[in-house]
Amino acid sequence: MLALYRSGQQVKALDVFHRLRATLAAELGLGPSRTIRSLHEAMVHAHHELSLEVIGA
């Protein structure tokens, strides 16, 4: 998800989260971990800490 997000494919990254959530619920009766939910929330709100900083650019 993070790689997709950082490569400019934010919609695909969010889709991965939704598919993961659905798969976990259907197959295991679980939801995503707190870490994954936090990443999703950060992507939805375009938090600056998710941006990839290029050193030396």
Image (tube, rainbow, N blue to C red):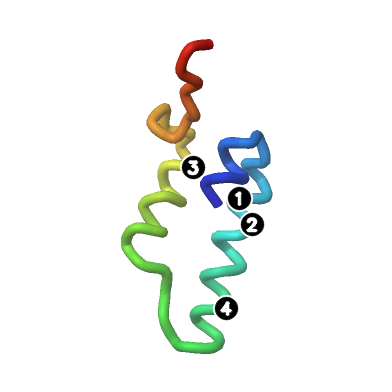
Residue 43 image label:
3
Which sits in the foreground, 47 or 57? 57
For the residues labelled 4 and 2, the Cα–Cα distance comes to 12 Å
Please tell me the numbered disc located at residue 15. Answer: 2
Nearer-the-camera pick, 51 or 40:
51
Mark 2 in CB contact with mark 3 (< 8 angstroms): no
What residue is disc 1 on? 13
**Residue positioned 67% across, 41% down in the render:** 9
Task: Estimate the spatial distance between the alpha carbons at disc 4 and disc 3, rounded to whole Å.
Answer: 20 Å
Q: Horizontal and vertical percent for residue 2?
A: 52, 46
Place of residue 14 in the rendered image (x, y in percent of width and height, measured from the top left): 59, 52
Q: Is there a contact, CB below 8 Å, between mark 1 and mark 2?
A: yes
Task: Bin the neighbour count of mark 3 within 10 Å (Cα to Cα): few under 14, some 14-19, many 20 and up.
Answer: many
Which residue is label 4 attached to?
A: 23
Q: Is residue 46 left or right of residue 6?
A: left
Is 39 located above or below residue 16 in the figure?
Answer: above
Which is nearer the N-term, disc 4 or disc 2?
2
C-beta proximity under 8 Å, tags 3 and 1: yes
Residue at 50 percent of width and 21 percent of height: 54
- C-alpha span from label 4 to label 1: 15 Å
Kind of element beneath mark 3: helix
How many numbered marks have been drawn onto this rendered protein structure?
4
Q: Residues within 10 Å of mark 2 (few under 14, many from 20)?
A: few
Residue 34, horizontal then vertical, whole percent: 32, 62
Secondary structure under tag 2 reads helix
Pick whichever of labels 4 and 1 is earlier in the sequence: 1
Mark 4 packing: few (<14 Cα in 10 Å), some, or many (20+)?
some
Q: Is residue 37 above or below residue 39?
A: below
Q: Amino acid at mark 2?
A: Asp
Tell me which residue sits at (62%, 41%) in the image.
Answer: 10
